Image: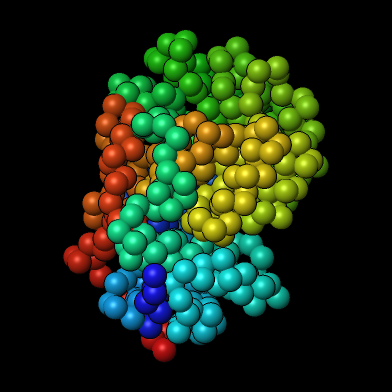
Amino acid sequence: MAMPTIKAVRAYTVRGGGADYHDTQGYHWIDDHIATPMARYEEYRQSRRSFGINVLGTLVVEVEASDGTIGLGVTTAGEIGAFIVEKHLSRFLIGRQVTEIEKIWDQMYFATQFYGRKGVVVNTISGVDIALWDLLGKLRGEPVHALLGGPVRDELQFYATGARPDLAKEMGFIGGKLPLLHGPAEGDEGLKKNIEKLADMRSKVGDDFWLMYDCWMSLDLNYSIRLAQKAQEFGLKWIEECLSPDDYWGYADLKRNVPKGMLVTTGEHEATRWGFRMLLEMDCCDIIQPDVNWCGGITELIKISALADAHGKLMVPHGSGVYSYHFVITRHNSPFTEIIMSAPNADEVRPAFSPLLLDEPVPVNGRMKASALDKSGFGVRLNPEVQLHRPYAS
Ligand SMILES: C[C@H](O)[C@H](O)CC(=O)C(=O)O
Ligand SMILES: [Mg+2]
């Protein structure tokens, strides 16, 4: 079957929410005194926005085929990403068959390797890759999950990340992941408060509900082990992203030293098959958590997921809403998935990319039927009311 070719690539930026879920305004639990690597500086401890966690903003990529069909991808990369798409990556797309996804990925990655490999460049590649999968699905009239081999189960199960696991339990989720509030710079007093918070939440949710701590790269090995040991009494299911993503050796040590039964997870700031190969071969964790928006997109996630499977590990993606759902439903080693509670008080379920995308399905009672994903491509569209800016139109 002759497929259309790619006729245009457009990159837009958006402020105030969308893919960059840290790009919030006013009070939001996600910006409220959370432990970070910058919390060693008192002036950056209270708010993550104070050190620029929201500086990138959202990148929207549109890839248009010769028949006018448009594939859409969004990610965290903002204006830098828009520059990379329009000035560098578009040359690997214009005039190509829309089915050339693997070759386009390879060319985007190796052409940017001298200034890329991880971070904002791979976020940007991910956004383009997602738009290509969306376009292919739309042209074939199939959901992306069908292109990936189809569902292996009838529904997705979710845990919720946010400040209120007690409310998440009432909403039907299988677990709640709390942000760790205090890091090593706040000493033993902070450690005590972290444990009190967990104990309080455990008393509210009962014994059978999963509770996890997200440490967002903010700890050192010793603090992580002490936290894990003290948290065991309160049934902490996993301890997440304790250390710098570059400290593979520290993660391997941590995994050997947490209490038996407690899981170590990481990977949301890791990228590509090579980064995840390090985590897997060095036995750094029990669950890897690539973010589809940041790890290289769907094309790279296929490889990362297979590597994890071959190592007997689970792959439970970080965030990325509908882009994760289409993948998770197709893989046995991804038995559940995450939703980050984007409501400021974590008291209601909102679509991950709201208000930027329309038609994104949300879990109901902590679950989502596979049939909710049965639309062409990723089944989402841009909200016409959201203002887009195209800084580098070529
Ligand atoms: C809550 C965490 O600090 C972060 O904002 C989100 C995250 O790491 C996760 O959902 O995982
Ligand atoms: Mg995390």
Q: Residue furthest left?
A: 385
Figure coloring: rainbow
Q: Nearer the viewer, residue 367 or 351?
A: 367
Residue 323 lies, with reference to residue 289, above or below; the image says below
**Image x and y of residue 197, in percent:** 49, 23
Residue at image coords 42%, 57%: 20
Q: Residue furthest bottom?
A: 394
Q: Nearer the viewer, residue 348 or 150?
A: 150
Query: With 389 as the anchor, is 233 left or right in this view?
Result: right
**Image x and y of residue 314, in percent:** 60, 34
Residue at image coords 61%, 74%: 107
Q: Residue furthest front?
A: 1
Q: Nearer the viewer, residue 321 or 52?
A: 321
Q: In this orientation, does residue 13 appear?
A: no
Q: Quick one: quadrant of the N terminus?
A: bottom left
Residue 7 lies, with reference to residue 120, above or below; the image says below
Query: With 312 as the anchor, is 68 left or right in this view?
Result: left
**Image x and y of residue 54, in percent:** 45, 59
**Image x and y of residue 199, in percent:** 50, 16
- Displayed quadrant of residue 219: top right
Residue at image coords 71%, 55%: 274
